[in-house]
Amino acid sequence: MKNPKVNPKQVKLVVFVIGLVFLGFLIGDKKDSIKKLIQSPQSFFQQSENIPASNLAKMLANKNFTFINVHTPYEGEIEKTDSFIPYDQIVASEKNLPKDKNAPIVLYCKSGKMSTEALVTMKKLGFTNVFHLVGGMDAWTASGKKLADLSQLAEEVLPKAGFELPIAWGDIGPQLVKLGVIDLDKFNKTVGPTDEQKEILTKGSNANIRIDTNNSQFVVDVLWALGLAQKSIVYDEGPMGKEFKKDVGNFASTGGWSLARGEAVKYLNQFDLVKLTDEQQKKVGEIAQNVYRPCCGNSTWFPDCNHGMAALAAIELMVAAKLDDEAIYKNVLKLNSFWFPDSYLAVAAYFARQGTPWDKVDAKTVLGKTYSSGQGAALIQQKVGEIPGRPTKGGGCGA
């Protein structure tokens, strides 16, 4: 008996019909699966939300996901971590999570327990592509990998001993007092200087300028007064001398200086307290345009707040002392770090997680708009999240 002839068209039709029936079954009972397949094929075909340490190491080599440490208290972290958000603060920190609810996210903790809870919480918030490291950091180290530790970052950025700048106070204090830029009675009542600081103002000092947590306000105030009074290319050619010349007395750095004899604006750009050549003034202007501060969006070329004027004074002193650009940027970063500790700890954590320790960062890059402007610093803080040892406050724009 002859085998019946197979009609290819009939075969295709049968397969098509069977496919439709199967698809109908899926659509009828598996709508969520179909939706997940369309929206996130990677997540759909992932058989488990659990990622073993061996797989994570491969994933980190070509990282395309947000990596979050959810363990509390802080006990270290895995390389290329994006942020630290304790598992019980996920809901409160939702603004720090990816805006795209379908973006791939990997969570981890020390053993896997907290990350499991965090995963459930994130799914309730609507995140569809969330995974976690099985066994957490314990499994990671057991596989032969190391952990990074940012718990000592605060001491690197803000050492208890502070920093010494390669410039001396000299007779800056007595000159500012004599000219009236600093009213000594007002200054003493408002700032409350120590005996040593009073001598800097009244007698001068050959000691180099030092900054630490305890004296950061004194340093910013004296340098602020100097930056206000010193004749500068910034006030002749910058925004305060051009676009905003008519409003020059209305800024926090001018109208806000309440420790002078009379109105502060009458001292603006008036005195050659720091002797600078035309070439040095030009250098001051160039550096000032690359130095931002986290309290606002302007560079030191537009010093409309106290920290801008204080940074300007520091730049002028260091240019007069013939320091090279690299040294000037490094020392301004030291000042900024104590004036805005919260911001620069976040920046340091960001670079550490990219594999660059704080003592190896390029100070000019850090002081630029991306990391040190108000907008840039806020974005970095949002990306980094909580940092162990981070202070709870930064610098303000007042005397």
Image (cartoon, rainbow, N blue to C red):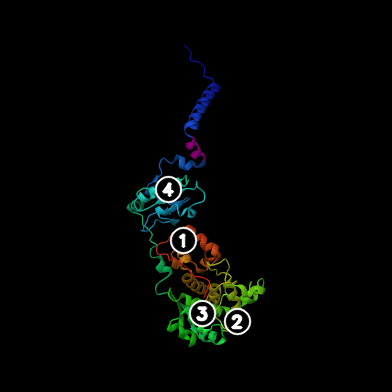
Question: In the image, which disc is placed on residue 267?
Answer: 2
Label 4 near label 3: C-beta < 8 Å?
no
What's the distance in space between the residues labelled 4 and 1, CA to CA? 26 Å
Crowd tier of the residue under label 4, counting other residues whose Cα lies within 10 Å: few below 14, some 14–19, many 20 or above: some
Q: Which percent across, then down, holds residue 254?
A: 59, 76
Q: Earlier in the sequence, mark 4 or mark 2?
A: 4
> What secondary structure is marked by label 4?
helix
Q: Which percent across, then down, holds residue 86?
A: 40, 55
Looking at numbered disc 4 in the image, what kind of residue is underneath it?
A: Thr
Crowd tier of the residue under label 1, counting other residues whose Cα lies within 10 Å: few below 14, some 14–19, many 20 or above: many
Q: Earlier in the sequence, mark 3 or mark 4?
A: 4
Q: Please indicate, yes or no, whether residue 218 appears anywhere in the rendered image.
A: yes
On the image, numbered disc 4 is attached to which residue? Answer: 121
Q: Earlier in the sequence, mark 2 or mark 1?
A: 2
Q: Which of the two marks, 1 or 3, is nearer to us in this view? A: 3
Q: Which residues are magenta?
A: 31-38
On the image, numbered disc 1 is attached to which residue? Answer: 350
Q: Which percent across, then down, holds residue 43?
A: 46, 42
What's the distance in space between the residues labelled 4 and 2, CA to CA? 58 Å
